[in-house]
Image (cartoon, helix red, strand yellow):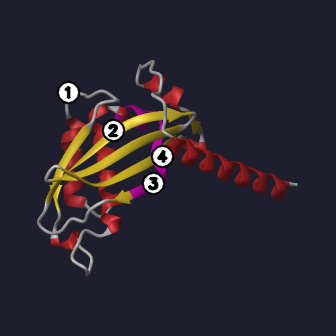
Amino acid sequence: MNLFFRFLRIFLPAFFTKKRTGLMDVHTIRSSVWIGDQDPLGHMTNSRYSSFTDLGTMNYMGRTGALMTYRKRGWSPIVQHESITFYRMMKFPQKFELTTQLVGWEDCYICFRHRFHSKGKLIAESRMVARLVGRRRQKVTTDMALEAMGLDLTSPPLSQRYLDAIADLQAKDRERDAEQASKQD
C-alpha cells in the first residue's frame, strides 16, 4: 500500500473504534489529491484509485469488526477482481469522498462497490470481488465468515457484472485445479 500516512490516519481509528458499524452500511473516507498522486498529465493516476479502494476496504473491515474476527481465525482478505470505471478526472488539491459498500456475496466471494465523489459528482466507480483465505489455503465461505461474526444474513441480489466476474474466477479455479491434477498423474 503506497498511502502509508493516509492508511494510519484512516485505519487506526477504524480498527480501534468501540462503536462498530453494520456490514451493509455505507462507509465513507474523505481525502484530497496530493501532488504525489498525480501522473505527468496532472490528474490523479489510475493506480491511485485502486490504492484508495484498498484503503476503503480496510476501513470497512476495521469499522465492522470483521478484520479482528477474521484474523483471530487466521483468515486474510484478498482482492481477486477489480474493475474501475472513470467518469471524470481529479487534480491537486481537489477534495473527494470515497464510499465503500458491501453489495452482496456468493459462495466464497464478497462483492464491494467503491464510489469516488467530488463536488457532488461521481468521479469513478469500482466493482471489487474479494474473498477470505485461511491458513494453508483453506477455503473460507461467506457462510463461515458470517457465522464467525455471529450473523445470519442473506445476500442481496448481485448485478450481472458481479456474477460475470465470479463466473470468470470460478472458471480460472477449475482450470488451475485441472492443471494441477494432470501434473500429479
- Mark 2 and mark 3 lie on one chain; the one further toward the N terminus is 3
Question: Start and end of the magenta stretch?
Answer: 67-84
- Residue for badge 4: 129
What residue lies at 38% left-to-right and 57% top-to-bottom?
85
Mark 2 and mark 3 residues within 8 Å of each other at the beta carbon: no
Instruction: Inspect the image, locate mark 4, and give the three-letter code of the amino acid beneath it.
Output: Val
* Image x and y of residue 36, in percent: 20, 72
| Left-right relation of 45 to 142 | left
The CA distance from mark 2 to mark 1 is: 18 Å
Mark 3 and mark 1 residues within 8 Å of each other at the beta carbon: no
The CA distance from mark 2 to mark 4 is: 12 Å
The CA distance from mark 2 to mark 3 is: 14 Å
Q: Which mark is residue 101?
A: 2
Image quarter hosting the C terminus? bottom right
Q: Which mark is residue 82?
A: 3
Looking at the rendered structure, the secondary structure element under dot 1 is loop
* Image x and y of residue 148, in percent: 45, 25
Q: Dot 1 surroundings within 10 Å: few (below 14), some, or many (20 or more)?
A: few
